Image (cartoon, rainbow, N blue to C red):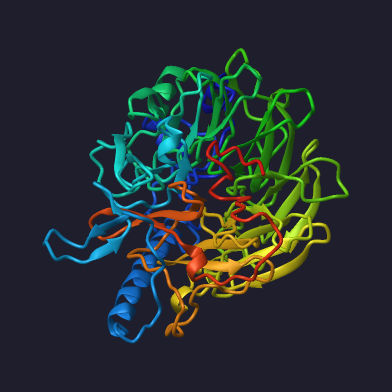
Amino acid sequence: MAEKEAKEKNAPICTTHKHEKSRLKKGFPQETQHDKLSALAVLRIKSVFVLQPMFKHPGSKLGFIKRRFFFLKSLILFTAFFLFSTAGSLPAAAPPVLDNWHHKADTSPDAPLRAGVRLSGAAVTYSSPVIAEIDGVPQNGLETAVSGGDGILYVYRADGTLLWSAALPNARCPETGSSKAVSSPAVGPILGNGIPYVVATYGGLRRSGCDGGVAVFRGSDGAKLWSFSLRRFSRREKFWSFSYNVVSSPALADTDGDGKMEIGFGALDRNIYLLNGSGSLRWYYNAADTVFSSPAFADVDSDGRLEMLIGSDITANARLRPPTKNGGFLYAFRTTPRKPKRITFQDSSSYVWRTAFDQVIQSSPLIADVLPSNPGAEVIVGSGCFFPERTSQKKGAWVKILKLTDGKVLRTLPMPACSSASPAAGDLDGDGALEVVSIANGHTSIGGVGSSRVIAWKPSNAETLWSVVPRAGGSNDPFGADFKSVVIADLDGNGSLEVIVANGTNIDILQGHDGAALTCQERRCAEGAYLFRTDRVLNSTPAIADVNGDGRLDLVIGGGRAHYGVLYAWSHFSTFLGSSPGTMAPNAAPWPMFRGNAAHNGVY
C-alpha cells in the first residue's frame, strides 16, 4: 500500500527503518528519505519514522549538534573568563567603529559605549548581512539587511539608525529559541520596476513545528509584498514533511531576460523551489532529501537563459531506479516554467546535468573563470560533513571545480577535512589569475586535526598558495567551516587584497598574497596589535562595502549579547591594518559578502 501511494505521488520510498510499518499503521505518512535537519557540522535527523532518543548515538546529527552547542557554550564561557582574567594586560586596540554604529552597555547616563547597533530582538545566529541600495535613495549611502535568530528582519541606514524592521511569518511561532531565521536576505528589483525589495527565507536548524518559506518586503519602508509558506503549500499539494524550515539563502536572477527576477532556494522539506518575482510558483523539484545549499545562476548551455545550480543531500535507496548511494548531488536546473509544476525526483528533463558525489553538498556553488585552460567559467563547490555515519572519518575533504557546461569534475582542491563552507575567489597575488579560498573544519569528530584552516589555492594546478590556522586572540573555532564563507576585499585601500573570516568571537584579517595575519593572533597581543571583540561566537559571513560613501570600505557582521542582538560595523582600516601595498585598484572588493553580491547569485 505504501509503495502504491508513493508511486502515485511519484515519491521515492525510504525503507531503511524497521519502525516504518508500525508508524504507518498509526497513520503517519510515508516519507521519501531521511531528513538532515541541521547543518552546523551537519546535524542529521534520521527519519521521522524512527521513535528513538534524540541523542541515541555519537554519529547522529542531533547528537553532533548537541555537542556542537556545548562546545560553543564552552567557548563563550572561556572567552568571557579569558577577557576578565586578562583585563588590563591586553594592549590590543579595538578597530575603529563606523560612525554612529555603537550602543550603550546599559541605560545609565554614563554607561560606556559598545561597538555595533543594538537590535530590538535576539542575536543574529547564522544570517549574514547584505549591504545594498535598499531604500532607493543613493544619496544617503547604502543600507544593511540582516535576519535575527528570532525571525525579525532588520534594515539599517548608513548612519546606524533603523530604517525599518519586520517580523518574518514564523516570528510569532510559540516555540522559544533563536533559530527561526538562519539564512541571509538578498536584495534586488524583483518586479522589474527598479524598486529594491528585500527577500528573506525563514526557518531554523532545530526540529521545529514552526513554518518556513520566503517573504518579500519593499526596501523603502518594509511593506510586505508577499510571502510563500511551505506548510500551506504542502497542504495544497498534499505532501507531508517533517520540517518546513529553509536554511538555504534565496538567490535572485532574471533567468529569461524579461526584466523581472526569479527567486530560487532549497528547503528541508526535500524540495528545491523556483518562484516568480510576483510570488507565484514556477516549479518545484522533489530532491528526495534535505537541501541546505543556496543557488547560483549561470547560462550553462548557451541558450540565452540562466540555469539554477544548487546542491542537495541524498541517502542510499536501492528501491529507486536508478538506485541512489549515500552522498549528494549538484544540479544545473532549467528555469523555464513547467506544467505540471511538480518535478519528480530524477526527472532528467528538468536539468541540463547532475553530478553525484560521495558526500552531501551543503556548500553553495561559485561561478567563476578560474581555469585558463578551460573556456569560460567553471563551477566551484565544497561538500558537507555527514557521510559515512557513526564515524569521524568523513568524506568530502575537498573543493571541486566542475565544467559549467556538463558538470564534469576538472580539478579537486585537497583539504585536510570536510567543509560545508562556500568558496570565494579573487586575484590574491596580483598575477592576473583568480585564486580560490575556502575554510576547512578542524574538529576531530569530523576528521579534522583540531583547528579549522583557511586555505587559498592556485586552481590551475591545484597547489596550495597558503594554508593558515586563524587564531584571533589566541583562539580557533574548530567548526569554522560551518555554513559560512570568507570574503575578499582591499580593506585598507592600498591596492592589495585581504581575506576576512569570522573566527569564534573575533574576526581574522589575513594578507591575501601570503596569508599572513594582520590582526592579533596571540592570547596576549603585542603593543599596537588590533583585535575585534564581540560577545558571542560569530557563525555568519561578514559583508564589506563603503556604507556611508566616504571612500573607505567598512566591515559589517551580525552577532549579539546574552539578551539582545548586535549589528557590528568597523571602518578606517587604513589607519591600522598595515598590509603590503599592491598594484590593484584601491578599495577593490571582488567577493565582498556571502554569495558574492546583494542578489546572492553566486557569480564572480
Instruction: Using the rendered image of the protein, determine whether residue 437 is visible from the camera's viewpoint.
Output: yes
In the figure, 142 relative to 553: above or below? above
Residue 381's spot in the image, x, y percent? 67, 49
**Could you tell whether 520 is left or right of 311 in the image?**
left
Query: Residue at the left extreme?
Result: 108
Q: Nearer the viewer, residue 213 or 377?
A: 377
Q: Classify the position of the C terminus by image quarter.
A: top right
In the figure, 306 relative to 207: above or below? above
Residue 531's spot in the image, x, y percent? 43, 72
Instruction: Using the rendered image of the protein, determine whether residue 243 is visible from the camera's viewpoint.
Output: no
Residue 582's spot in the image, x, y percent? 69, 64
Tell how many labels. 0
Query: Residue at the top extreme?
Result: 339
Q: Quarter of the image holding residue 244?
A: top left
The residue under the point 78% across, 23% down is 303
Q: Nearer the viewer, residue 80 or 61?
A: 80
